[in-house]
Image: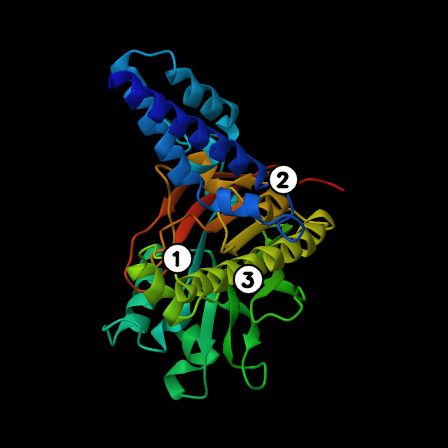
Amino acid sequence: MKKATDRAILILNVLAAFALILSYLAPLVNPAKIFFPALFGLAYPYILMINLLFICYWLISLKKEILISVIVILIGWYHLNNTLPLNFKDVKIPDTAKPDQMFKALSYNVRGFDVYKWTSDPDVKRETFDFIQKQKPDILCFQEYYTSDQKNDTHRANAKQLSSLSQSAVFYSAGPNRNKGFGIATYSKFPIIKKSRIPFISTSNAAMYTDILFQSDTVRIFNIHLQSIRLQQDNYAFMDTARLKYNNEQISEIRAIGSRLKTAFSMRAEQAKVIASYIKDSPHPVIVMGDFNDTPQSYAYRKIKKGLDDAFRKSGRGFGNTYAGELPSFRIDYIMYGPPLLSSGFLRIKTDHSDHYPISTLLFMGEPVRK
């Protein structure tokens, strides 16, 4: 009986190890061309945990089969560090650093300040601004930023709530006149000397960059919100109650969800290519902040991160999940930066004002890069 059990578990272990290898392909394969590796990449944290359970089983049994998952996990050490960085010590800012060489960056998808009353809290917007004021960021990037013609919902009214961040730039991607509605906004304590949107095709998501004057240097801030999956309420209801029955209705629902996932993966891949080209061509040091709607085990993350550092990977802790909505929680919000910048003290801050958690880090400007 024990041999039969071990044989069955061995087969399942081999399948789990193979699934983990497939997840390693997700950042390398454009999902617009081959889709299925992206699904394995999305499930990477869960596939990893399954392999860890197999390691525990073989360890208790003192069997050499433990090497199957151990070797496959070690092969993907880079991917493991992206998901669960082993930062036993925080990154140390140079002792010679002066206060005026450092600034705090914060990124937050605020879900429209709860304009559609997703929560039962009528004071979400005020509480969000109170939270930000306590955090005292020097640069702030909002995604799903919302304004309207209502007195307390205009961009001017929002700016008054953030008086310490006197400079701002907004790009509306979803609104009747493109001057209100939903979009992205960048606020800065430092002068904004240039701003430009990054065009996306056929989407209500958005990206833009702003050049800020920090001391005598110019830093380019990318604020991005990549393509959302846009699941419908009936999709969420199905996932909450799904039991495999293999009937026509259920298969149709699974196909609908799969189609939305494929479309979103493909659109994010194309958007990431566009953003990566803007980053590559930047004449200034770069900071990228925003909601990627994708995990570190994705093609979009890899394309944008090329040549940059991920602040979470440098000084974050744990899994760092930033999505707090109805789907399983993943790390999909990021702060990245290029040389000569350094980061320290990354934080993922748990709040209940949105379906995303805000993230922040301290950035230090070293010697400027001359191109």
Task: Indicate whether 56 appears above or below 297.
Answer: above
Left-right relation of 159 to 123: right
Residue contact between numbered discs 2 and 1, judged by CB atoms under 8 Å: no
For image coordinates 56% across by 82% down, the residue present is 179
The crowd level at tag 3 (other Cα within 10 Å; few <14, some 14-19, many 20+) is many
Residue at image mark 1: 246
Query: Which disc number belongs to residue 28?
Result: 2
Q: Nearer the viewer, mark 3 or mark 1?
A: 1
- Helix, strand or loop for disc 3: loop
Residue contact between numbered discs 3 and 2, judged by CB atoms under 8 Å: no
The answer to whether one can see residue 52 in this image is yes
The answer to whether one can see residue 228 in this image is no
- How many marks the image carries: the answer is 3
Callout 3, which amino acid? Gln
Q: Separation of disc 3 and disc 2 at Cα?
A: 19 Å
Q: Nearer the viewer, mark 2 or mark 1?
A: 1
The crowd level at tag 2 (other Cα within 10 Å; few <14, some 14-19, many 20+) is some
Where is the C terminus found, in terms of image quarters?
Answer: top right
Left-right relation of 41 to 160: right
In terms of sequence position, does the residue under pointer 3 or pointer 2 come before the other?
2
Query: Which disc number belongs to residue 227?
Result: 3
Task: Indicate whether 319 appears above or below 77.
Answer: below
Left-right relation of 289 to 53: right
Callout 2, which amino acid? Leu
Where does the image place residue 350, in percent across and percent down from the top left? 29, 53
